[in-house]
Every structure is written in structure tokens, then in C-alpha cells.
Image: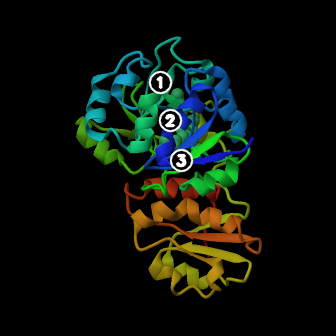
Amino acid sequence: MKTKILKKNQLDEAVDLLRQGQLVAFPTETVYGLGALATNEKAVKGVYAAKGRPSDNPLIVTVSDAEMMKNYAQEVPARAQKLIEHFWPGPLTLLLLVKPGSLPQAVTGGLKTVAFRCPDDQLTHDLISKLGKPIVGPSANTSTKPSPTTSEHVYHDLKGKIAAIIDGGPTRVGLESTIIDLSVAQPVVLRPGEITPDELSSVLGEQVLINTGKVSDNMVPKAPGMKYRHYAPAAPVTVVDRAQDFARLKLTATDGVAALSEVIADVDLPVKNKFNLGADLTAANHNLFNALRYFDNQQQIKQIYVQGINQGQASYAYMNRLNKAAAGKHFTL
Ligand code: TXA
Ligand code: MG
């Protein structure tokens, strides 16, 4: 199969492909998603196959607005309503009880809940409203690889396996949406993202719990994706928490370093071994996955060191993805 790159004036072609049960990658403000008509079981199974994703890891359902969501949610609790008014369209995914029988098993992995997302992206909004039905939307990467923040990343991973990619340019945030579970007595953040637990608490007017995601392989975790290796480039990754430790690393030509501008400037390595994450946390969020992919394309790199950033809740999402990429490995003297 030849994978087409579609521009914004070719949305109708994307709608037709999705109607026919084909797979089409789409832009969002977080990362690119891999779309298939959520009500078409065969198409949804194709998403797992294209990504190489384990079948017990359920898919997000991407809607054009809250009205569309109501056809697939058993109920929309008052908490969900508040968060929708405040944050949608935007990088917040809501876990609600699914309306029984409204979606194929393959979408929810047989769970009683379903994750709803309404991205802040005009192209994708128009795509789903024209389609009139939701599309599933896992990140459009090969399973275990860093999520794609450009259409080129998607093409690299999925060319020949999907019908088309809608090119919307680089994504704004660079890390996936915050997931909040509203199917339980007290709201819980299952995955940190740009929207922090404190922001959610202040809109809800109540405490929001944080799931630290520590689960072992034989457990059934609340967000099944948490138990798998993630965001992993080919070379092993080590987190360097203190900027001054980069000077102590005894770096060689087979090492790669990704760090903030002020740190990277002082790292004694050839330019091609270094990736500048930018000036601040927002830039680092935007660039982290790109950095991990950059080193995958440098055959000489055998070890990657990435700067840890500790700025409280604002850096939870960055550290969550980085810790997974590093399988928890931090530099210690
Ligand atoms: O920003 C995002 O959310 C992106 C863009 C493309 O929308 N999508 C994304 O999807 O990150 P994915 O599949 O890569 O990550 C979704 C996570 C997975 O860890 C999955 O296990 C969890 O959400 N999830 C999905 N449905 C769930 C459910 N019913 N219960 C618990 N966790 C669920
Ligand atoms: Mg993913």
C-alpha cells in the first residue's frame, strides 16, 4: 500500500478513506493520532496491527465535540461537564463509562470505560464533523517508539501500512494529553500532560488524585498502556537530573546528549551528538520525542543522556515520558 500525504484542501479524500474502513493519521495539538472509524471493528483491529500494539491496550475515541461524545458515553457526569466547558477542545482526555453496545470491543479492550478526547486542531475537527462519527486516536507511532510530533515521524513508522497522513505541520505541545478518570468516586489523573492536576482541581473545586503508574507485568492496570515499555529509542537512555553532572559524564563519540540550551552549550561533544531541547520546559516538552528520534537516526550513538527537569507539576508530563524512555535509569555518581 502506498501511503498518501494529504494537505488541508484534501480533507474530503481523508473522509472517504475513513468511511471505507481505511487508516488515516491526523494532526492534533499534542501528537499525531492514527485514525480509523471507531464504529468499524475491522478498521479498529487494523490500527492495532499497523502499530504492533497489544490488543489489551484500549484506544482513545476522538470526537469533534461533546455532543458527539454523548452517543457513546453512558452518562456525562457534572464533573465532566465542567472540565469540557473549561478545557475542550484541548489536551484533556476524559475516562467515562461507555454506553453498552455503542462501540466495538476492540476499542475499549473489553473495559466498561472509554477515553474521550476532543483535540484543539481545526483540520481534525472538520474531518470528524464531516465524517459524522468518532475516530479512534492512539498516537501514530509504532508501539514502543516515541510518539510522532510531525507527519514525517508518522511516515517513518507507518509508511506502507496506512492509507494516508493528513499533514498539519509540527504539533504544538509535543507530549500526549492529560488523562483523567471520572468513572470512579474521586477523580484521578492516569497520565500527566500539559494540563496539570492543580488546574483540574481548581476547575472542579475538589482534590484530584495522581496515579503514579507503578504497575508490574502481571497486573491489570487502570490505564493498560502504562505497563508496556514506551518512548524507547534504540540506544539506552539515562536521565541526568542535575545540570552540573553533564560535566562529570566522561562523554565519548558514541554518546548523545539532549539538554536545555544553557547546558548543551557547555557539553564537550561534536554538534551531531547534541540535541538542543530549547530554552525552557515548554520547548523541552515540544522537542523531547523529536530528540529521542534524532538519536535513532545516528548509528554511532550507543548511549543517550537526557536532562531531567524538576519544576513541580508543570514538569510531570516531561519527566513521566523521559522516565519511561529511560526505563527508570538515572545518572548517579
Ligand atoms: O494526546 C493524546 O492523547 C494522543 C493524541 C493522538 O490524541 N493519543 C494518545 O493515545 O496518546 P495512546 O493510545 O497512545 O494513549 C492512550 C492511553 C493508553 O495508555 C491507553 O492504555 C489509555 O490511554 N486508555 C485508553 N482507553 C482507556 C480506558 N478505557 N481505560 C484506561 N485507559 C485507557
Ligand atoms: Mg501512545
Residue that carries the numbered disc 1 in the rendered image: 133
Q: Earlier in the sequence, mark 1 or mark 3?
A: 3
Front one among 320 and 44: 44
From the image, tell me which residue sits under label 3. Answer: 32
Q: Secondary structure at mark 1?
A: loop
Q: Which mark is residue 150?
A: none
The residue singled out by tag 2 in the image is 12
Asked if the residue at label 2 sits under 8 Å from ligand 1, the reply is no
Residue type at mark 2 is Asp
Check contact, mark 1 vs mark 3: CB within 8 A.
Answer: no
Count of marks overlaid on the render: 3
Question: Residue 2 location in percent, x, y?
Answer: 72, 44
Residue at screen point 49% across, 81% down: 263
Q: Amino acid at mark 3?
A: Tyr
Distance in Å between CA atoms under marks 2 and 3: 19 Å
Q: Is residue 187 left or right of residue 302?
A: left
Task: Name which of mark 1 and mark 2 comes first in the sequence.
Answer: 2
Q: Which residue is at a point 69% across and 51% down the rendered structure image? A: 157
Query: Distance between the Cα atoms at labels 1 and 2?
Result: 14 Å
Residue neighbourhood size for the residue with mark 3, other residues' Cα within 10 Å, grouped as few (<14), some (14–19), many (≥20) = many
Please say if 185 is above or below 47: above
Quarter holding the C terminus is: bottom right
Identify the amino acid type marked 1: Lys
- 85 over 214 or under it: above or below: above
Residue displayed at 70% across by 48% down: 159
Q: Identify the image quadrant of the N terminus.
A: top right
**For mark 1, does the 10 Å Cα neighbourhood hold few (<14), some (14 to 19), or many (20 or more) residues?**
some
Is the CB–ligand 1 distance for label 3 below 8 Å? yes
Mark 3 element type: loop
- Where is residue 82 shown, x and y percent of the image? 26, 32
Left or right: 89 in relation to 159: left
